[in-house]
């Protein structure tokens, strides 16, 4: 008896989500976008999610029976999604930081190898495995396995292990975000709009995915309820696409984003000028930028204002965020030293520390972003 192909509103929603995911992933992983680390991990996350819900779509519609060799092809990605999600958050919040990436994908690599025990099974075994779950009335009851596809019972508990993996990285991401909120002097809230709300919202959606997985497995037990998970994942891909487009400067004039962000602010023009004068005096007289523990909240305390007001003045008066504004002072100071008579007196590591950086790598990157040269190249060009 042939398997009837099913196509309904869920199929359409998931199918469009798959195409949307491939489209977003392509643009995020282009050479021009890969220069920003967070784009790499978001792009890989989106592609992994798209492949995962593509397999769910094939199972839900019954099309997997026509390409049965693809059965469970995306299952190892269960252990890639959470690390990619976390690394996107990590590098989005701290683009200058460095972290070893490969340990996050050890479990993914090990399970990828383990899944070969299933992938090397004959097509008849895979078809019967699919029928036993989605069409038990057609299941002949004979698996024809060449060897045990799950000797350590890992596949049997794949959803429980996936949930534990998701929860572990969710805890890491929430902790990272909370510390960043604290560092910037913002109040961590579940809702509201601020500079970090995009990453907070992304985490909230990941929590919803976890809750849906729990509900589906408690409600249906088998894989037949996975289309609910895939539907929400497709919705998440739509939101990601909308977020990327809405944050693009293509649709706004320069400075329009800042105007919208602070349009409800009660800060008047004279007050902005006063805060600006305090900021410049602090930088000029006390060389605050050279403090390697400089932060928005500490800066606000120094000038007797709230972090939000100081952030608004920096955005509106200088057209940049706090970190880029701070870097502009540091790099300008470094350029003055590298142009002076003592330019060969200091090592690059010493110079980095003098202007407020904790590492040579971070200093080199910031210097090159602003000047197009490394500190060494700049010093040589002066010579």
Image (tube, rainbow, N blue to C red):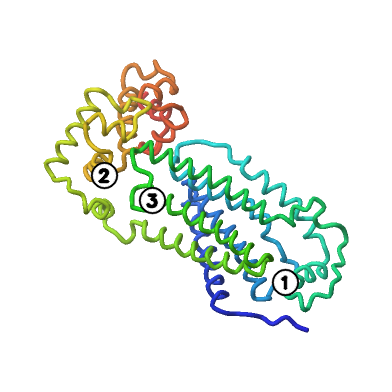
Q: CA distance from mark 3 to mark 1?
A: 42 Å
- For the view shown, which residue lies furthest in the front direction? 218
Q: Nearer the viewer, residue 266 or 70?
A: 266
Which part of the image, by quadrant, shows the N terminus? bottom right
Residue ID for mark 3: 197
**Image height of 322 relative to 23, above or below:** above
Q: Nearer the viewer, residue 203 or 66?
A: 203
Q: Residue at x 71, y 52 (%)?
A: 112
Quick one: SS at disc 3?
Answer: helix
Disc nearer the start of the sequence (1/2):
1
Please determine whether, in this image, residue 306 is positioned above or below residue 262. Answer: above
At label 1, counting other C-alpha atoms closer than 10 Å, the crowd grade (few under 14, some 14-19, many 20 or more) is: few
Quickly name the residue at label 2: 315
Q: Which residue is mark 1?
A: 67
Q: Residue drawn at (45%, 22%), measured in percent from left and top?
A: 349
Secondary structure type for disc 1: helix
């Amino acid at each position: 008896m042939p398997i009837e192909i099913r196509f309904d509103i869920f199929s359409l929603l998931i199918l469009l989500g798959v195409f949307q995911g491939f489209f977003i992933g392509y643009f995020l992983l282009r050479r021009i976008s890969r220069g920003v680390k967070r784009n790499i991990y978001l792009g890989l996350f989106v592609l992994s999610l798209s492949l995962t819900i593509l397999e769910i779509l094939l199972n839900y519609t019954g099309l997997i029976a026509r390409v049965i060799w693809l059965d469970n092809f995306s299952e190892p990605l269960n252990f890639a999604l959470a690390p990619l999600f976390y690394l996107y958050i990590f590098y989005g919040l701290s683009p200058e930081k460095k972290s070893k990436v490969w340990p996050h994908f050890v479990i993914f690599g090990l399970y990828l190898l383990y899944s070969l025990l299933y992938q090397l099974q004959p097509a008849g075994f895979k078809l019967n495995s699919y029928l036993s779950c989605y069409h038990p009335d057609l299941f002949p009851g004979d698996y024809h396995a060449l060897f045990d596809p799950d000797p350590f019972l890992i596949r049997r508990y794949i959803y429980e292990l996936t949930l534990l993996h998701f929860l572990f990285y969710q805890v890491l991401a929430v902790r990272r975000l909370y510390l960043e909120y604290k560092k910037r002097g913002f109040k961590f809230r579940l809702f509201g709009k601020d500079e970090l709300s995009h990453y907070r919202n992304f985490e909230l959606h990941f929590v919803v995915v976890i809750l849906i997985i729990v509900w589906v497995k408690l409600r249906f037990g088998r894989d037949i309820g996975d289309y609910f998970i895939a539907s929400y994942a497709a919705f998440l891909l739509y939101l990601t696409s909308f977020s990327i487009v809405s944050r693009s400067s293509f649709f706004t004039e320069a400075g329009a984003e800042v105007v919208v962000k602070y349009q409800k602010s009660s800060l008047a023009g004279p007050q902005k000028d006063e805060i600006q004068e305090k900021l410049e005096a602090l930088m000029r007289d006390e060389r605050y930028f050279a403090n390697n523990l400089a932060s928005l909240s500490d800066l606000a305390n120094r000038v007797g204002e709230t972090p939000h007001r100081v952030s608004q003045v920096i955005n509106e008066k200088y057209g940049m965020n706090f970190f880029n504004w701070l870097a502009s002072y540091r790099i300008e100071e470094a350029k003055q030293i590298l142009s002076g008579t003592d330019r060969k007196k200091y090592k690059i590591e010493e110079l980095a520390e003098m202007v407020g950086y904790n590492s040579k790598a971070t200093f080199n990157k910031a210097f090159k972003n602003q000047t197009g040269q490394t500190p060494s190249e700049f010093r040589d060009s002066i010579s």
